[in-house]
Amino acid sequence: MKLFKLAGLLLAGALVITGCSGNNSTQPAASADPGSAAEASGKVGDTAGDNDGTIKIGLIAMLTGNNPLNGLRMQQAVQLAVDEANEKGGILGRKVELLVEDDQTLQDMAVTCANKLIGEGVVGIVGPHRSTNAMAIEQVVNQKGVVTITGGTTPKITTLDNPYLFRCRASDAIFAKVAATYAVDKLGAKKVGMFYNNDEFGTGGEETARAYCKENNIEYISEGHNTNDKDFTGQIMKMKNAGVEAVLIWTHDPELAIHARQIKELGLDVPVVCSPGVTMPQVIDMCEAEQIEGWYGVTDFVSGSTFPATQQFVEAFESKYNVPAELFSASYYGGAVALLSAIEKAGTADREAVRNAMAQLENVSVPIGIITSDQNNDMMHEVSVARLENKVPVYVETIKVSQ
């Protein structure tokens, strides 16, 4: 489908956003209790779809905590999609209303946020982002029967067999396979090393890269670390002494920036292929140009792509917010477009009908590619490769991979 048209100018004044702790908020009061019969069945089903007035959708974003800027970009992007829909007359002739909750990048808060949004009558939820948080809420959304669209990339999400949990980004089974393949086939590495975070995100990528190298008889070593670690000297020196010919890095923003600085300082002079974060402004701005020059990132989104949906989104987002469009904004705009498309396709805001429509989405153009839901509720099956040149991610190619 075509991207919705850009809405009017951004409303003056900053949004007052709260988490799930009951602080003051610009959000509307919670809707009426869905009813004892619905609660007894465990699913609120068509209660949300039959309400008069607005169609409510929810967003769970990390607006405070470790990655507040990423959460802000999520919120801005989903709000843009909602504004564009409303500018065109809404969905099913009804205005779309966005309810926002802050999970603070914490798993227990994500569960609280999901329950709160479901109780307020949302038709579906966009977010949360972190794989760990998506795994934390999956039983809640399954029991309540509410479509939820995460950008968590751990391959474990694919194995959950949860009919209500969808993914608006490619799995790390695709990302990491593309990264390893690129290091071997395009960069000529015969011995590959990998630095990875010990959480769901990092270990999912590491398992995929390890399996690829084993299958293709590529020598492989890996070194793990934890979130908030500050010194990777030992791991880097092990890679250097082992004579690796290319390095993969699979970790979060702060740790990625520290790797960049210490790899340069310690003279590990080999090609580097990273998880998507390296292509994002918030990571690039933490690095000196020479630290990441020539590095590659496998990513959902490169603003310089010539894909029409990408260019339309970049123009709309940057005109509205006067900040660069990046991975979080592009991915979750796509997730919101997918949810709104499913509601429109269903012809109703009934939660179960929307879930069925989500499972049947195909060939929906969004900024990071083409959405087509598969049997695992994975909607994205392609990633881009970008090369860092003077702190600018330059599009190289798009690679489509089946899991």
Image: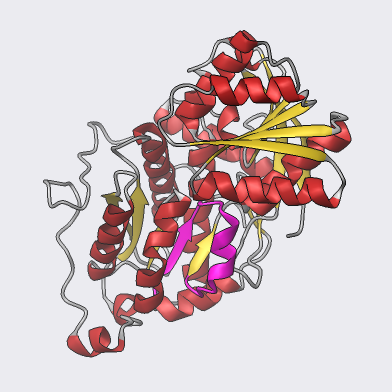
* Quarter containing the N terminus: bottom right
Which residue is painted at 87% across and 45% down in the image?
217
Q: Position of residue 189 (x, y in %)?
A: 84, 30
Which residue is painted at 29% across and 44% down in the image?
104
Q: Position of residue 352 (x, y in %)?
A: 44, 80
Q: Is residue 148 above or below residue 175?
A: below
Q: Residue 148 in magenta?
A: yes
* Quarter containing the C terminus: bottom right
Q: Position of residue 387 (x, y in %)?
A: 72, 25
| Residue 190 quadrant | top right
Residue 109 is at least partly visible in this image: yes
Judge by depth and name the residue closer to the eye, 150 or 11. Answer: 150
Judge by depth and name the residue closer to the eye, 346 or 288. Answer: 288
Q: Position of residue 276 (x, y in %)?
A: 60, 36
Question: How many labels sit on residues?
Answer: 0
Q: Is residue 4 left or right of residue 268?
A: left
Judge by depth and name the residue closer to the eye, 113 or 31. Answer: 113
Residues rendered magenta in the picture = 145-164
Q: Is residue 352 above or below residue 22?
A: below
Residue 90 is at least partly visible in this image: no
Q: Is residue 211 left or right of residue 133?
A: right
Which residue is painted at 72% across and 47% down in the image?
210
| Residue 36 quadrant | bottom left
